Amino acid sequence: MNNHLKNTPAAQLVKIEEFNRLYPIGTPVLYWTGSIHGAGKRGDTRTVAQMMCSSAVVWVTGHAACIALSHILPICEIPITADPAVLNGGADVPAD
């Protein structure tokens, strides 16, 4: 997707539909309320994702306000592997 199309209302609706299809209410997530640095905070989704002020958002336990989907990482997406190729996005990893 082109960078200039990422934040259009239509693109946000696609993100919402995909998030809701993949992650039901109660999904464990890491979230960031400001810049995305550090480990993030742990919570569970408590609503479906929805549009608010032209942004795709969801509410999570442990925080009173909504969080932009761009600041949400479902915990089930964190790879549990020791394979450097997988952790490196499939890029070539030099052999030992």
Image: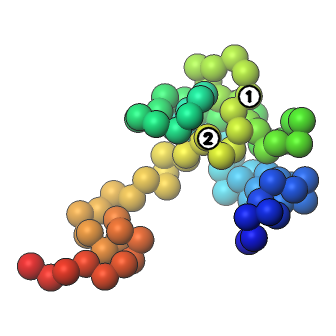
The image quadrant that residue 79 belongs to is bottom left
User: Which three-letter amino acid code belongs to the residue tagged 2?
Assistant: His
Query: Measured along the vertical axis of the image, is residue 78 above or below residue 62?
Result: below
**What residue lies at 62% left-to-right and 24% top-to-bottom?**
61
Distance CA(mark 2)–CA(mark 1): 10 Å
Q: Quadrant of the C terminus?
A: bottom left
Residues under numbered marks 2 and 1 in contact, where contact means CB atoms less than 8 Å apart:
no
Q: Secondary structure at mark 1?
A: strand
In the image as oriented, which residue stretches furthest toward the left?
A: 96
Q: Is residue 62 left or right of residue 69?
A: left
User: Which three-letter amino acid code belongs to the residue tagged 1?
Assistant: Cys
Which residue is under mark 2? Answer: 71
Q: Position of residue 27 (x, y in %)?
A: 59, 41
The image quadrant that residue 49 belongs to is top right
Q: Is residue 37 left or right of residue 86?
A: right
Which residue is under mark 1? Answer: 66
Residue 16 visible in the shown view: yes
In the image as oriented, which residue stretches furthest toward the front?
A: 4
Residue in the foreground of this view, choosing between 46 and 42: 42
Q: Residues within 10 Å of mark 1 (few under 14, many from 20)?
A: some
Numbered marks: total: 2
Q: Position of residue 70 (x, y in %)?
A: 65, 46
How does the figure colour the protein chain or chains?
A: rainbow
